[in-house]
Amino acid sequence: MDIIYVFTSAGITDGSVQNKVINQIRGLRQAGMSCRGLFFTTDNITASDNTDDFSFIRIPDVKQGYFKSLRQRNACHKAVLGYFTKEQPGFDLIYFRYDHAGRFLNRLSNMYRKRICFEHVTAETEEIRLYKKENPLRLNLSSFLGNLEFMWLPLLQETLWAKGIRRKAAFGICNSEDIARHETKIAGGDYLTFIGGDAVRVEDYRLRTSAPVLENEFRMVFLKGASTAADFNGLDRIFEGIRNYKGKFRLKAYIFGKNLVYEKNMVKKAGVEDQVIFGNYISKDDAETFMEDIHLGISAMGLHRKGIKGTTTIKAREYFARGIPFIYGHNDPDLSGSPEAMKYCMEFPANDEPVDFEKVMEWYIQLNSSNTYFSDMREFANNYLDYSIKMGRLAAFIKKHQAHA
């Protein structure tokens, strides 16, 4: 099986999403597939930037002006279509990480009916609508143009093209049943889906060898990846939970990332400025060292604000690989139904209620009585969450489906 993986937001400098894509490619190859990435980028590139896993394709960087983000995205899809039209590479299946609908992607789907699949990591239309909450419409030109560029026109494109694109695809790869139902509804009920979800390359993460001592202070951490407000992280639930906690431990949360203005305002509103420490983005190596002294990891707590109550997150899988217990606020298809997994993480309902830290502390103290839980978490990650496992399942699905296509 010969697969071309199309990634449309690549860069010379790896980010978390690009690293995920590279690991997916390697996982498919490990599972016996012939898979290579086509990474479309506006960065200046040379032949030496290409690797055994992928090749960069340069796309034009559109000029400044109105609706630059939309014009850039359309230019990218036009470049993808142009590449396949001109080069006509041989393949059995295109694996396309879905970013948005549009006329050029629709034409590519027409060109390769039932030979292209899409990965959906979110309910796209619901995520677009989040712009309205984070940037409410105001009576000025800038606000109007912002809503037009980042919400109204993208929703129009989805309305015009999304259904046809999905119906012409071989299948969709979704992070959860919730997302699969959303995508099938967009397709008018005609969309084969596979529940895949995020994974982790377990060996890339340092396993802690002991749990930090719990004395007076209970330390938590959240690493923010998004550069926007990202209301779906749900950190307000954490801050309000800290405010409500009346137990004997002093709760302290560390938040690292870019553009933390939104979070700082929430902390001020909750009145817990002395219990939340902010820091800039930290490297993976620095994070490994810092987490040696962390009691609890925080994963996404507000994904229901995207209109979904179930998904997978990379954060949760990294916590498992490191051996750090954590909390999260949604259904996770790999964890929620597993009694073994739920020993090491605590799930909260997908709503806006503050986290009950009395319950968290009761659960954590019981878990911490075991001196082997971190190695048990690592074993679970190796058996169920590693890319070799996840992409092996996907490879089996592709072989079975394409054999009968």
Image (cartoon, grey):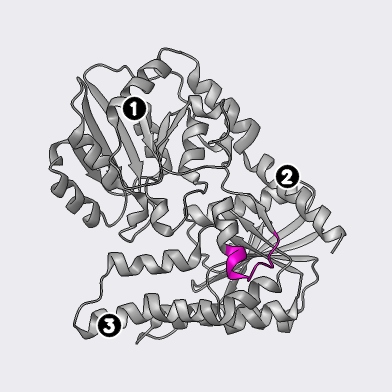
Give amino acid for label 1: Val
Q: Mark 3 and 2 residues: CB-CB less than 8 Å, in contact? A: no
Give the mark nearest the N terminus, 1 or 2. 1
Q: Indicate which disc residue 208 carries.
A: none
Q: Is the magenta stretch mostly helix, strand or loop?
A: loop
- Quadrant where the N terminus sits is bottom right
**10 Å neighbourhood of mark 2: few (<14), some, or many (≥20)?**
some
Give amino acid for label 3: Phe
Coordinates of residue 365 in the picture (x, y in percent): 35, 17
Residue shown at 55% from the left, 22% from the top: 376
Quote the CA–CA distance across marks 3 and 1: 43 Å
Give the mark nearest the N terminus, 3 or 2. 3
User: Is residue 184 in the magenta section?
Assistant: yes
Return the residue at label 2: 392
Q: Is residue 18 left or right of residue 86?
A: left
Quote the CA–CA distance across marks 1 and 2: 35 Å
Give amino acid for label 2: Gly
